[in-house]
Amino acid sequence: MHLKSNRDISKDKNVTRIIDILIEYPDLIIQVSRIFTDYNTNLPDIEEIKEYVNDLFSSPKVKTPTYINNKLIYKTIKLYMLSTESFSAAKGKVLENIVYVFGPFAKGLVRNQVFVEPTIKDKGYIVGESDAKCDFVFYEKK
């Protein structure tokens, strides 16, 4: 995979360095997104965030080299040390760049199998029979 264009990619060095690591080691997106989910604002207690981030990257599930993890830990904690407004902007730029770099490169999804809508019955009576092909199925529980 390679980036064909860097249009709209942030020029912020904190952001670009994090994205560069994620491009090389895409499995780390899971850790970065988890950090941003669990700590969606920068807390006054930076030590709590440091401990959480270090523990997360110490997991046996993280298979990347230690020096890469340490770089990403440092860059991520650096974001949390920014002012609240700067942190929110930088975090948003990181997430936007993740989507921009790793997002879909085609206008539509390619499916090998197509879902065919089944016959719908209510108490044994057919209430809907379409045999229509559906690209996506949504279910809303009320």
Image (cartoon, rainbow, N blue to C red):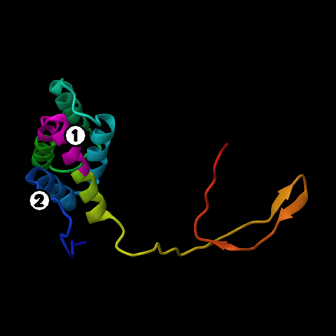
Magenta residues span 77-92
Q: Nearer the viewer, residue 132 or 115?
A: 132
Between residues 57 and 19, which one lies in front from this camera angle? 19
- Looking at the image, residue 83 lies above or below residue 20: above
Answer few, some or many: residues within 10 Å of disc 1's Cα (few below 14, many 20 plus, some between 14 and 19): many
Q: Earlier in the sequence, mark 2 or mark 1?
A: 2
Residue 11's label in the rendered image is 2
Asked where in the image residue 25 lies, by quadrant, the reply is bottom left
Q: Is residue 84 magenta?
A: yes
In the displayed image of the protein, which residue is found farthest to the front?
85
Q: Is the C terminus in the top left, top right, bottom left or bottom right quadrant?
A: top right
Residue lying at 61% horizontally and 73% vertically, measured from the top left? 114
Position of 5 compared to 34: left or right? left
Label 2 is placed on what type of residue? Lys
**Who is closer to the viewer here, 86 or 39?**
86
What is the spatial separation of the Cα atoms under label 2 and label 1, in whole angstroms? Answer: 26 Å
The answer to whether residue 103 is above or below residue 93 is: below
The residue indicated by pointer 1 is: 57
The quarter of the image holding the N terminus is bottom left
